[in-house]
Image (cartoon, helix red, strand yellow):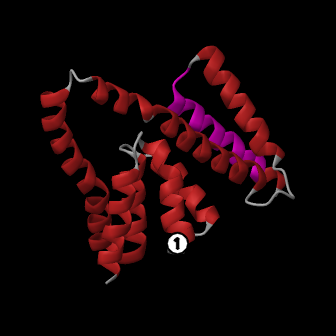
Amino acid sequence: MELLELFFCFFQIGLFSIGGGYAAIPLIEAQVVDANGWLSVAEFTDLVTIAEMTPGPIAVNSATFVGIRLAGVPGAIVATLGCIAPSLILVALLAVLYSKFRKLDVMQNLLSTTRPVVVALIASAAVTLVLQAFFGGTVAGLDPIAVVLFAAALLFLRLLKPSPILVMLACGVIGGGLYYITG
C-alpha cells in the first residue's frame, strides 16, 4: 500500500508541475509535508537543498529521496516512476497535438497563459525557502549568518558571475565554520 501511495503522490506532483523544478516545490511540500506528513518543514528544506545540489530535476530527485526514505530502493523506484510518468504521457500527446495544430492562434494563446502561473509557483517556492533559511521555520529568530551568507552569495553571483557550484561550496565551508564557532 505504501508503494502505491508513493506512486500516486508523485504522479500528482509530476502531473501538475508545470514550469519545471522550482514550480514543483510548493506541490511537493503540499503532498510530502502537509498532506502525508512524511517529512517535517525542516526536513523538506534539507530535501530541496539536496535536490538542487544533485544532478537531475528537482522533482525527480525529491521523489527518489522521499521514496528511499519511506520504502528503500523499491520506494525510490516507484516514486521516481510516478514523478516522470505524467511527463512521458503528456509529452507524447502534446507532440502529436502540437505538430497537428501548431499554427492555430488558440494553441499560441494557451501556451502564453501558463506563464503567470509558473512565475507565481516559483515565487511561492522562493518565499518558503527564504523564510525557512532565515528564520528556521519561526518568525521569532532571524539567523544573521544565513542572511549574510545569502547576501554575499547573491552579490558575488550577480557581480562576478562565478561558478554557482564554487559559491555553494564556499558558503558551505564558511557557514559550517561560522556555525561551529558560534555554537
Q: Which residue is mark 1?
A: 35
* Numbered label tally: 1
Residue 28 x/y as whole percent: 48, 58
Residue at the right extreme?
140
Magenta residue span = 162-179
Above or below, 168 relative to 26: above
What residue is shown at x 49% (from left), y 43% (from top)? 22
Residue at the bottom extreme?
1
In the displayed structure image, the side of residue 26 where residue 130 appears, left or right: right
What residue is shown at x 75% (from left), y 44% (from top)? 146
Q: Main secondary structure of the magenta part?
A: helix
Which element type, helix, strand or loop, lies under badge 1? Answer: helix
Residue 69 x/y as whole percent: 42, 71
Image-quadrant location for residue 91? top left
Q: Amino acid at mark 1?
A: Ala
Quarter the C terminus occupies? bottom right
Taking depth in this image into account, of 126 and 73 the one nearest to the observer is 126
Residue 87 x/y as whole percent: 26, 48
Taking depth in this image into account, of 89 and 50 the one nearest to the observer is 89
User: Is 182 contained in the magenta span?
Assistant: no
Image-quadrant location for residue 112? top left
In the displayed structure image, the side of residue 121 where residue 7 appears, left or right: left
Q: Mark 1: few, some, or many residues within 10 Å (few <14, many ≥20)?
A: few
Image-quadrant location for residue 98? top left
User: Is 171 contained in the magenta span?
Assistant: yes
What residue is shown at x 53% (from left), y 60% (from top)? 29
